[in-house]
Image: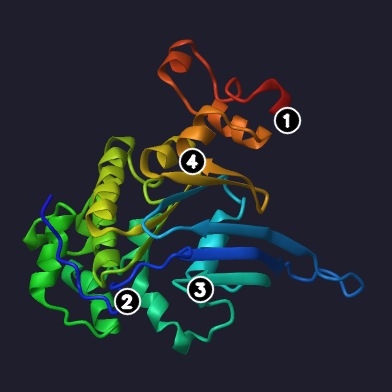
Amino acid sequence: MPELTRLPRPSDATARPEPLIRVKDVTRDYPRPRTSLLKRAEVVHALKGVSLDVQPGERFGIVGESGCGKSTLLRIIAALDRPTTGKVVVDGKEITNLPERRLRFLRENLQLVFQDPMSSLDPRMRVRDIIAEPLVVQGHPASGARVKELLDAVGLSADAGDRFPHQFSGGQRQRISIARALAPNPKILVADEPVSALDVSVRAQVLNLISDLVDELNLTLVFVSHDLSVVKHVCDRVAVMHAGEIVETGTTGEVYAAPRHPYTRRLVAAIPTLPKALAGATPQDLIPKGARP
């Protein structure tokens, strides 16, 4: 893989002893639309007192089924949403109630890779402009050399910059998304289900690319997935979320080999394996009898 140049960071000189990301007792409530003049609107409790720490340079996974609150948690960490109660600290600064005009440090140091690359890339922009956009917004020089360097780093040729997103496959579009996220040289890379929309044949390639770039650039990775086996492949530590709460945290090896919480055991039991497939197991068979509806 080509070596990617790191842009200068004003705070690179010393490593912080405290966690790079700290989430403390965060809740997030969403009111439903009111349907009656006589009844109060119902409230959806998306997050219920979530706490976690992510250390500098760590690969931290968040795993859980759809609707468990993991994407809401990511949005709060990225200050794209605000918690109802609780505190979020990123790189030593509390961001819980900071106005957008004071969040420039976060926009420079934390970048996201979204689930569906086609919907997160502007179809009217050429790839070179898509990759250069965060550089322009954050005041870095958007040189063609930097764009070419980023394309090389994600395994795309230089002439890819002249094309539009619809001219690429799903896996290639996700590589473009990764290049865009890396453009301003962030400290933290947040990946929200980055391979779930891709063909099985290219998932491993994209996962390996993310893993290699995280190592090469010494990034802190927060990786969200509904698939525990994917998280095990990429992450050092994992938090398991269920119904808006973190029910188990540990190293990926420990959680995968000896899950303690019943919900985590269900996730592990549902991971497809070749022996199960050859034996004709169905998805319903993979759920432990005590956990079936």
Please identify, in this view, whether the residue under mark 4 or under mark 3 is nearer the observer: 4
| Whole-percent x, y for residue 38 in the image | 92, 73
Q: Distance between the Cα atoms at labels 4 and 1?
A: 29 Å
Name the kind of residue labelled 1 in the image: Pro
- Figure quadrant of residue 16: bottom left
- Identify the mark nearer the N-term, 3 or 2: 2
Mark 1–mark 2 CB contact (< 8 Å): no
| Whole-percent x, y for residue 167 in the image | 19, 57
Q: How dense is the environment of label 3, judged by Cα within 10 Å: few (below 14), some, or many (20 and up)?
A: many
Q: Which mark is residue 293?
A: 1
Taking depth in this image into account, of 64 and 186 the one nearest to the observer is: 186
Report the side of 3 relative to 182 (left or right).
left
Taking depth in this image into account, of 209 and 292 the one nearest to the observer is: 209
Taking depth in this image into account, of 44 and 95 the one nearest to the observer is: 95
Mark 4–mark 1 CB contact (< 8 Å): no
Above or below, comparing residue 67 to residue 268 in the picture: below
Mark 2 highlights which residue? 11
Please identify, in this view, whether the residue under mark 4 or under mark 1 is nearer the observer: 4
Name the kind of residue labelled 2 in the image: Ser
- How is colour applied across the structure in the image? rainbow
- Identify the mark nearer the N-term, 1 or 3: 3
Please identify, in this view, whether the residue under mark 1 or under mark 3 is nearer the observer: 3
Q: Residue at x 47, y 74 (%)?
A: 92
Report the side of 135 relative to 26 (left or right).
left
Mark 3 highlights which residue? 79
Mark 4 highlights which residue? 251
